Amino acid sequence: MITSLQQIVEHVKGKPAKRLSVACGEDPHTIEAVGRACREGLVKAVLTGSKAKIEKVAAENKIDPGLFTIVDHPDQASALVDAVARVRAGEADFLMKGLLDSSIYIRAIIDKEKGLLKPGRLLSHVSIIQVPRWKKLIVCADAAVVPYPDLEAKAQILTYCIEAAKRLGIEKPKAAIICAVEKVNPKMQATLDAALLSRMAERGQIKGAVVDGPLALDVAFSKESAEIKGVKSEVAGDADILLFPAIEAGNIFFKTCSYLAGGENAAVVAGANCPCVLTSRSDSEDSKYYSIALGSLLA
């Protein structure tokens, strides 16, 4: 079982390099991460965007632009269209966002004529988080794409998380459906959804994981908290997956881990024809590098 982000890197290194298409790869952290991934044999990459800007940023950061292919485009729109088209044409195995607004990136992915969205599928942000005080990686969603998922959307997002967890070598991942409380409360829709998701998993409508909820965050990570609260759960104190009730909860957890808990992360958009690396423009080189490794693992 893979228990750290670096282990994802090592696992990918042992496989043939996947082909990465980077849209508007003009910012330092993206160029650094892609250059590092190419140098270490994780991927073969094509960067679309302003060739002059890419070469300038590479030179300023002492990165050899010969590590990747640069395709010159005068503007973001044409660079993004080209990057997506390369995936559609089978010339790349997965996609990555560079210096580009996330909403524009998502719109290109879901474009009905030229995008990458599978019919009937929902896009969702799936992140893998590593924090020093926890024994393994945390798979969680959704922190960036789906604002207020309904029951059907949560079931689909949970499936993406289960698929990612299995790629990490977790045979039967334990999924906690996170709420503010552990009891079903008709006035709190998130608790009703959590209970239904748990029941759906028991009946085989959601496969491949042990699913329980509603569970508060402390119960998901602490068996002692579960015992004190009288909560009996196979997931309590040993969660692999966290499914959040809304984007605010997921985003706050994601950024708290990164900025206050010394955590590191990797993230992709799932549900498209390929993994689509989605990191914030402010994310570190390491986060973008680990996200490339995750994209390669999932591709």
Image: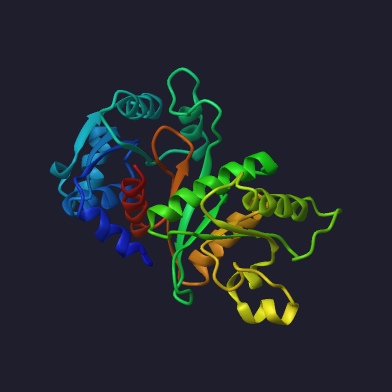
For the N terminus, the quadrant is bottom left
Quadrant for residue 273, please give it.
top left
Quadrant for residue 18, please give it.
top left
Q: Position of residue 261 (x, y in %)?
A: 51, 72
Identity of the residue drawn at 60% across and 77% down: 222
Colour scheme in use: rainbow
Please indicate whether residue 260 sits to the left or right of residue 244 in the image. left
Foreground of the two, 107 or 41: 41
Q: How many marks?
A: 0
Foreground of the two, 268 or 185: 185
Q: Residue furthest right?
A: 187
Identity of the residue drawn at 34% across and 25% down: 88
Please indicate whether residue 221 sits to the left or right of residue 62 in the image. right
Foreground of the two, 160 or 134: 160
Quadrant for residue 286, please give it.
bottom left
Residue 9 seen anywhere in this rendered image of the structure: yes
Q: Is residue 253 above or below residue 206?
A: below
Residue 282 seen anywhere in this rendered image of the structure: no
Identity of the residue drawn at 44% across and 45% down: 278
For the C terminus, the quadrant is top left
Q: Position of residue 112 (x, y in %)?
A: 50, 20
Q: Position of residue 266 (x, y in %)?
A: 41, 55
Identity of the residue drawn at 36% across and 24% down: 78
Q: Position of residue 204 (x, y in %)?
A: 60, 47
Q: Residue furthest front?
A: 203
